[in-house]
Image (spheres, coloured by chain):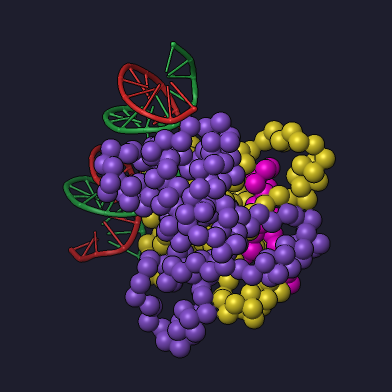
Chain colours: A purple, B yellow, C green, D red
Amino acid sequence: VATSDAARIERTVAAIRKSGDRLTSARLAIVRHLARAGRHLTAEEIASAIRARDPQVSIATVYRTLDRLEEIGLAYHVHLGHGPATWHLDDEAHHHFACQSCGQVLEIPEALVSSIRSQIKESMGCEVDTRHFAMTGLCATCSARQSQCAEPVVGLEPTT
Amino acid sequence: VATSDAARIERTVAAIRKSGDRLTSARLAIVRHLARAGRHLTAEEIASAIRARDPQVSIATVYRTLDRLEEIGLAYHVHLGHGPATWHLDDEAHHHFACQSCGQVLEIPEALVSSIRSQIKESMGCEVDTRHFAMTGLCATCSARQSQCAEPVVGLEPTT
DNA sequence: TTCCGTGCAAACAATTTGCAATAGA
DNA sequence: TCTATTGCAAATTGTTTGCACGGAA
């Protein structure tokens, strides 16, 4: 699980080839950037980072590549609240909590996720999708801060 | 809780006046439509319903009115997955589960919501916001159907 | 030599904003 | 009267699509 960036890039590239898809320079750059970022990225963030080296890559290619990677199962998108979708490689954490105040993204422990999932299954019969939609609210720090004082915290736009 | 539409309209109108805001015909029409719909509505749905009687109401007014109603605490928006935000009056159900396959919106029982909330509080220290973001996944029916056969169900676009 | 994947521009969907005109209180 | 609210049009943001060209296999 604690794989190096290089190994993750190689593995992803191999999977693209195995699926019969072509490995283009744009795709390689996108995979590299996703692997090295260590956080969730929007399509726009990926596009502008790549454009720094290769100015003519279009945002359309980024979207198309991300969609294709998701079809193959190599990357996926998460909605962290309002704003654009964010993406990461498939071998990263799967369940997210996004703070509406500071923007921080936390991983929800697997045990907690499966407990919630089974409670909802039992009580309502529903199968929760924790992959594509984050839970939102306030992280521990922001939650404590907001119960102390009325003043909102300076930082990212609130997600509500 | 089982208030009539008329009573809910009256109460909301009174609250608008009490807040010092003006009660315009557009605002009245929006409140009426929200009260009578009995389900979550998008701004566009509200606008086109109102335009049937009063063709020149603009979508901008609908958005501004909904925002204002939310500031006053009379209505609020929920994101049910992909697609536009949906709105309802404040005296309706607060916690939602949206099926990605059939589009159905279910209310999550209060007991379950508070149990989930306290588990997350205890384990991560986070305060979950259940008002503005629905949980998503498959409802009981769609979940059963999908485990039987591989064919997707005809209906609304999947939300994933 | 194939076509898959690309860049570009234009289309699209949801939402917001500027501004002069209007209509509530 | 006074100014909050409106309609209209245009701007913004995030994402998708059509199409002819270029480059991976």
Q: Nearer the viewer, residue A63 or B2?
A: A63
Q: Nearer the viewer, residue A24 or D4?
A: A24
x 46%, y 39%: residue: A65
Q: Nearer the viewer, residue B57 or A30?
A: A30
Percent x, y for residue A83?
Answer: 43, 55
Q: Is residue A41 left or right of residue B155?
A: left
Q: Is residue B67 left or right of residue A95?
A: left
Residue B134 seen in the current view: no
x 69%, y 59%: residue: B107
Instruction: Examine the structure image and report whether residue A137 is included in the region drawn in magenta.
Output: no
Q: Is residue A32 left or right of residue A57?
A: right
x 59%, y 44%: residue: A73
Q: Which residues are magenta?
A: B94-113
In the picture, which quadrant includes the N terminus of chain A? bottom right
Q: Quadrant of residue B57?
A: top left
Q: Is residue B3 left or right of residue A71?
A: right
Q: Quadrant of residue B159?
A: top right
Percent x, y for residue B121?
Answer: 62, 78
Residue A150 seen in the current view: yes
x 34%, y 75%: residue: A154
Count the labels in the image: 0
Q: Check the image and report above or below for A145 versus B150.
A: below
Percent x, y for residue A105?
Answer: 49, 67
Percent x, y for residue C23?
Answer: 32, 51
Q: Nearer the viewer, residue B88 or A77?
A: A77
Instruction: Examine the structure image and report whether residue B101 is included in the region drawn in magenta.
Output: yes
